[in-house]
Amino acid sequence: MSSDEYARLFFDTIKKSPGQPADDYETVLGESGIPAGYAEYVKPTADMPFNAMTQQIGSDGRIAGRIFLPTATPDDKGYYTHPFSPLKDAAAGSPHRLEWEWRDLGGPPIVTPGESGGGVPPTTTGISKEECQAMIDEATKPLHTEIESLKTAMAQPLHAHGPVNLPIVMDSLTSLRCKGDIDVEVKPGTATAPPQTGGGGPSEAATLVLLKKLLNRPEGQK
């Protein structure tokens, strides 16, 4: 819709004509059904009443006498609106204070909300849905690559690697049971068994027996 078409819609809605007395504008606009202006960053859509035409209504309900038409781009405060004044001072000597008018106050270009699916017409957005999806895919490609790399790494076996920090606490002087925490770095790979030592030395069982005898030796005995 053009500005003139919106003007006809406005005056048809309020049942008035330009130049007629408008001293009762608050009552007329309040009963018109034209909704209050939408919040900042709210884009006009096809399902908004009056083709997204709105008016200024204060938080206290006061009718300000300002009409807003939809735009495809926001103003410097984030509102997708182009303001018009429907009121002007009556001529000198008139018995009325105000008259109806339709005066452009400037702002972003006026648009007609989309007729299917809401939003402004695709030609006003500057980018198609396909182009937008392609941009998203390109921007997220490194993320997908990193996720696949992490999946591959997690699927591999792990093994302990690096120096071992093993503080040992004996349960008692008569027991060989120990407890403690192991602090190691875990990396991808497979576990490797420690090399087997050659013969000639005491067996593990013999070593444990000797260690137990030492622990059970009376104090002062060599």
Image (cartoon, grey):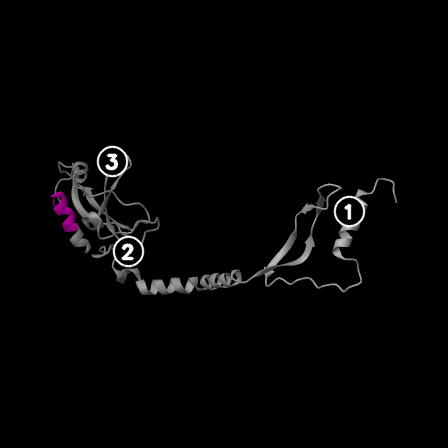
| Side of 222 relative to 61 (left or right) | right
For residue 85, side relative to residue 138 (left or right): left
- Element on which disc 1 rests: helix
Identify the mark nearer the N-term, 1 or 3. 3
Q: What stretch of residues is rendered in magenta?
A: 7-17
Disc 2 crowd rating (10 Å Cα; few below 14, some 14-19, many 20+) is many
Q: Write down the quadrant of residue 13 in the picture.
A: top left
Specify the quadrant that holds the N terminus: bottom left
Q: CA distance from mark 1 to mark 2?
A: 87 Å
- Residue drawn at point x = 87 percent, y = 42 percent: 221
- Indicate the position of residue 193 as horizontal and vertical percent values: 66, 62
9 inside magenta stretch = yes
Residue 131 point in image, percent of width and height: 34, 65
* Residue under numbered circle 1: 212
Task: Tell me the amino acid under the disc marked 3.
Answer: Arg
Q: Closest to the observer: 21 or 110?
A: 110
Quarter of the figure with the C terminus: top right
Q: Which mark is residue 62?
A: 3
